[in-house]
Amino acid sequence: MDSNKIVFDVVELSAKVPEGVPLIWQGADLESGPLHLELASGPSRGSFDYDAGRAQVEFHVLLSFPELADELRGLGVDEDLLRPVQAVLRSEGPIRDDHRLALSGRAELEPHDLFPARESDVSVLEGH
C-alpha cells in the first residue's frame, strides 16, 4: 500500500438539511421539509490520497423527509411511498490545508416509487 494513501471506513454519519430540497411530484411543486441523511447498511468507505491532495468517499445512505411523509400520510398515501430512500453517494474533492474536505458528487438511488431513479437527481455540491 502507498504510504501517502489512507483507506478508511465511514462508521457514523448523520446530517440534516433544515431548508429541505425542491420536489416536483405529480406535476406539483412541493416543499420537502427537512431532509435527514444517515448511514445505511453496506460498506461506506473512502480514501485520502495525500500525493494527489484528493479524497474519495462512497457513502451508503438513507434519505428521509419526515415532514413530507407526515403530510402524505395524512392524505392516505401508501406507506411504501413514505419509506426512506436508499442511495449510494460517490463523492470526491480536495483535501484542504486544514484537513477539512470539500466533497461533491452524485448519488444513485435504489428503486423507490416516490422518487423514480430515471426522474430523480441527487447531488452534493462542494462546500455544502
Image (spheres, rainbow, N blue to C red):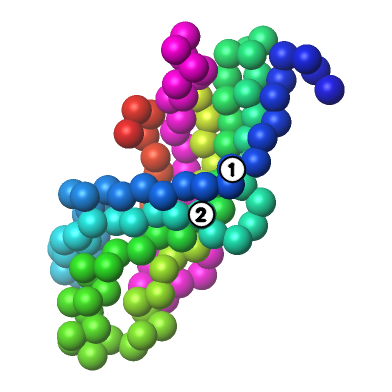
CA separation, marks 2 and 1? Answer: 9 Å
15, 83: nearer the viewer: 15
| Label 2 close to label 1 by CB (< 8 Å) | yes
Indicate left or right for 116 with 77 as reference.
right
Question: Percent position (x, y) of residue 2?
Answer: 80, 17
Say whether residue 108 is magenta: yes
The quadrant the N terminus occupies is: top right
Disc 2 residue type (three-letter): Leu
Other residues around mark 1 within 10 Å, as few (<14) / some (14–19) / many (≥20): some
Above or below residue 70? Residue 1 is above
Q: Which image quadrant for residue 126?
A: top left
Q: Which residue was labeled with disc 2?
A: 39
Q: Secondary structure at mark 1?
A: loop
Q: Residue at x 27, y 48 (%)?
A: 17
Most frequent secondary structure within the magenta stretch: loop
Indicate left or right for 125 with 22 as reference.
right
Disc 1 residue type (three-letter): Val
The magenta span reads: 94-120
Residue most toward the front?
A: 12
Question: Percent position (x, y) of residue 50?
Answer: 64, 14
Other residues around mark 2 within 10 Å, as few (<14) / some (14–19) / many (≥20): many
Q: Which residue was labeled with disc 1?
A: 10
Please tell me which of labels 2 and 1 falls first in the chain. 1
Residue 96 visible here: yes
